[in-house]
Image (cartoon, grey):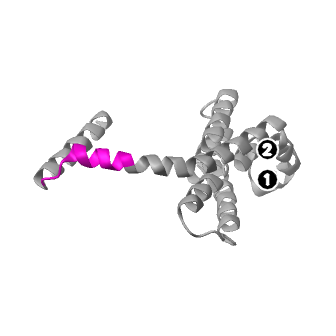
Amino acid sequence: MSIYILPIIFIFVFCYAFCKKVNAYETFVKGAKKAIPLVVDIFPYIASIMIAVALLRASGITESLATLFSPLFNFLGIPSQLVELVFLRPFTGSGSYALLNDILLQYGADSYISRCACVILGCSETIFYVTAIYLSKTKIKKLLYAIPVALICSLVGSILACLLCKII
């Protein structure tokens, strides 16, 4: 059933455009032309976040932080194997999924650690990535409370994810 969803959406959009007498192809091309300057504007922000994450992982800082904060995270209910994932998730989605892959390979898909890791990824967001994109296109430059609150919410979500996985 799910393999038909995307074709159905395309057919619906083209039928709707036809009924409204809109040239769907022309509209698509105009939208694509507007996307190019957007990509050019956003690219430096995306590149800087990705370089920062690569440097953090290559230098071993994330592993050191995970080891340092492991007792605190264990106290909060987050297994020590997931501390690096919790630290890395606010910065990068692809890096988080690479860590998830490592966790799934090491512990198996049905283990408590793997289930927690999957729920943590599902309930959290790449805060710094989204903020970088948002700031690149808006005039808002002061985010005094937004990032700390988002990070606290991400931590609370991780704690609740591990608690729910333990209960279920």
Residue 28 among magenta residues: yes
Q: How crowded is mark 1: few (under 14 residues within 10 Å), some or many (20 or more)?
A: some
- Of marks 1 and 2, which one's residue comes earlier in the chain? 1
Residue at 61%, 59% (x, y): give it: 131
Residue underneath mark 1: 73
Instruction: Give the Cα separation between the discs numbered 1 and 2.
Output: 7 Å
Q: Is residue 155 above or below residue 103?
A: below
Q: How many labels, in total?
A: 2
Going 36% across and 45% down the picture, which residue do you hit? 32
Residue 104 colored magenta?
A: no
Residue 158, image x, y percentages: 66, 54
For the question of whether residue 143 can be seen, the reply is yes
Q: Which of 73 and 26 is in front in this view?
A: 26
Mark 1 vs 2: CB contact within 8 A:
yes
On residue 90, the disc is none
Q: Is residue 122 among what the camera can see? A: no
Tell me which corner region of the image, top left, top right, bottom left or bottom right, holds residue 107. top right
Q: Position of residue 152 (x, y in %)?
A: 69, 64
Chief SS of the magenta region:
helix
Q: Name the residue under label 2.
A: 80
> Which stretch is magenta?
21-33
Task: Name the quadrant of the N terminus.
Answer: top left
Tell me if mark 2 has few (under 14), some (14-19) or many (20+) residues whose alpha carbon lies within 10 angstroms of its own. some
SS at mark 2? helix
Residue 148 location in percent, x, y?
71, 66
* Residue type, label 2: Ser
The residue closer to the viewer here, 109 or 133, is 133
The amino acid type of the residue labelled 1 equals Phe
Q: Give the residue displayed 50% in from the left and 47% down from the top.
A: 39
Residue 33 x %, y %: 37, 47
SS under mark 1: helix
At x 11%, y 53%, the residue is 19
